[in-house]
Image (spheres, rainbow, N blue to C red):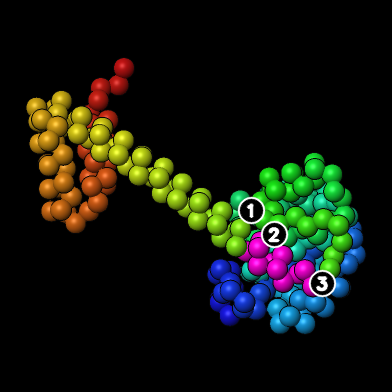
Amino acid sequence: MPPPGAPPAAGGALRVLLIDDGAHRVSLIRDELTRQGHIVVGVIDSAIAVHDCVRSLLPDVVIVDAESPSRDTLEHLALVSATHPRPVVVFAEDAAPGPMQQALAAGVASYVIAGLNPERLAPVLQVAIARFEQDRALREQLGEARTRLEDRKVIERAKGVLMQEAGMSEEQAFGHLRKLAMDRGERLVQVARRVVEARDLLKPRS
């Protein structure tokens, strides 16, 4: 079993936090999870405590059992998604599109309507975890792309400073930045950022 909070291995035992949001079927879910070899780390009857419980109990998955997820529940799930993201599964009876869309916007990975069948629990959890990992990988890729873009902007600004202040060509400016980075054992963007900051410090204030 992976350490708490790490992505669970395929087919491994899961640490699960249950939330009873009014449907009162969590005992059925808990029994089925236990039968399948998973660990129920907590059962709460209010989503108000979900953030603290996720932080302290480190579940792999959060399951919400609801007739229709309440607004408070969705708000607290959104907070968890922003601060301690976990795969979240909602079992609901309300087939209206509104609650489902709101749940997905709050970071819910799987929204299951029309009854709770214990036999469906395992595949639902597998799909929720896979979707969560896919979304997380995409967010990481987007974050890395934004970082690379910001780094390029800083390097371009530093080149501009050297070209203007030291009369270098663009090629010379880039070569100078690269040599400084190699000599100091630093990343190119770190050296470029200091060049830009030094220029900004020397600028006379209006």
Residue beneath label 3, please?
Answer: 118
* Residues at discs 1 and 2 in contact (Cβ within 8 Å): yes
Q: What is the spatial separation of the Cα atoms under label 1 and label 2, in whole angstroms?
A: 9 Å
* Residues at discs 1 and 3 in contact (Cβ within 8 Å): no
Q: Specify whether 23 is left or right of 137.
A: right
Residue beneath label 2, please?
Answer: 88
Rendered image: mark on residue 81: 1
- In what element is the residue under mark 3? helix
Quadrant in which residue 201 is drawn: top left
The answer to whether residue 126 is magenta is yes
Quadrant in which residue 150 is drawn: top left
| Residue 11 x/y as whole percent | 62, 77
Q: Amino acid at mark 1?
A: Ser
Of circles 1 and 3, the one toward us is 3
Q: What is the spatial separation of the Cα atoms under label 2 and label 3, in whole angstroms?
A: 17 Å
Of circles 2 and 3, the one toward us is 3
Q: Is residue 117 visible?
A: yes
Q: What's the magenta region?
A: 119-129
Q: Residue at x 25, y 51 (%)?
A: 187
| Residue 79 x/y as whole percent | 67, 51
